[in-house]
Amino acid sequence: MRILAIDIGTGTQDILLFDSTQEVENCPQLIMPSPTTVVARRIEEATRQGRDVLLTGSLMGGGPSAWAAERHVKAGHVVYATPTAALTFNDDLAEVEKMGARVVSEDEARQERGWTRIEMKDCYVDAIGQALETLGVPFQIDAVAIAALDHGNSPPGYSDRLFRFDHLRRGVQSDGGLYAFSYLPNELPEYLTRLRAIARAVGDAQPSLYVDTGVAAALGSLLDEKVSRRRSHLLVNIGNMHTLAFVLERGKIGAFMEHHTGFLNGEKLTDMLERFARSELPHDEVFKDMGHGVLYADGAVLPARPFVAVTGPKRRMIADSRLRPYFAAPYGDMMLAGCYGAVRAAARKLPQWREEIEAALAR
């Protein structure tokens, strides 16, 4: 069976066409710019041309696209956005207009005013299929597995960082382990608006599931041969925007921490991770430092010497640290850790293919 696995990050979208009949290392794979980076580049080109832009489509990951829109406005041009596209920048459309964008109706968006039209969208399954076909790879898939980070639609006046932390806390307390953060379409909570938008874009032509990107990286790192031989882990994914860490004992989550990578450096992160692994890092310290927070599971006794396995494009931040981290690279490719984690989640959530997927991963 074949799974299209996509890990949608801030800098890149990492793509794996998993085929259970092949050696995993031989499966087609691509590392491409992330959708939000592509949108940002299109906005920047409109800025250079001095043209107003109209953003249509759906809610998607922000970061680069939001920053490009802000720069476009500061350059004296106009950013128009339909309501669904505008949600990319803020769940409150009044706040979107405060940043200088103008929210227009779908009817207005159908008019032609000389603006540059840019579609907001996180997932391009058809475009990936066309690229693979062009390269001689038949695009026949049985399922889609996508990893992305979703802050969730927080209530007015409530911190989106705390709202995501609450989401992670509920997952840990559900006792489902890392798999608690993977969902079939009908299992997606209403508040995970980004993942739900991706699910709508994927459609129902084939089974699909959706995984938190930091969790997908953790699941993937456990497929590294050296990591898999240990039973106590400190798994750290240092992404371009988010750093997420889990302490695991025999697969059970004892603690997690999430921060924003931009507020960290090597020494600071090393110190935080050391204290985190000793149950000595307070939640309030991380939250006040513009992170999400820390949770120690009730009754959990953290392992004294967990094996430190690190993934993520910013992993070199702690390469020479006291932690002596191991850079996990499942099947020889760190950048695809999230894709492999999504495939592993598919084995759990799609039981009709569980044995076939797990046999291929173990081969």
Image (cartoon, rainbow, N blue to C red):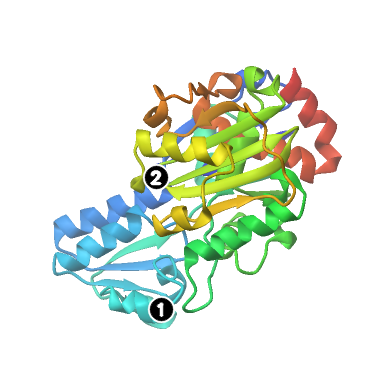
Drawn side of residue 15 relative to residue 182, left or right: left
Label 2 belongs to which residue?
Answer: 261
Pick the front one: 305 or 153: 305
Label 1 belongs to which residue?
Answer: 93
Q: Position of residue 310 (x, y in %)?
A: 52, 29
Amino acid, disc 2:
Thr
56 above or below 221?
A: below
Determine the secondary structure under disc 1.
helix
Looking at the rendered image, the quarter that the C terminus falls into is top right
Mark 2 or mark 1: whose residue is earlier in sequence: 1
Pick the front one: 43 or 337: 337
218 above or below 113?
A: above
Amino acid, disc 1:
Leu
Residue depicted at x 70% and y 58%: 185
Q: Position of residue 108 (x, y in %)?
A: 36, 81
Label at residue 325 = none
Drawn side of residue 82 relative to residue 310, left or right: left
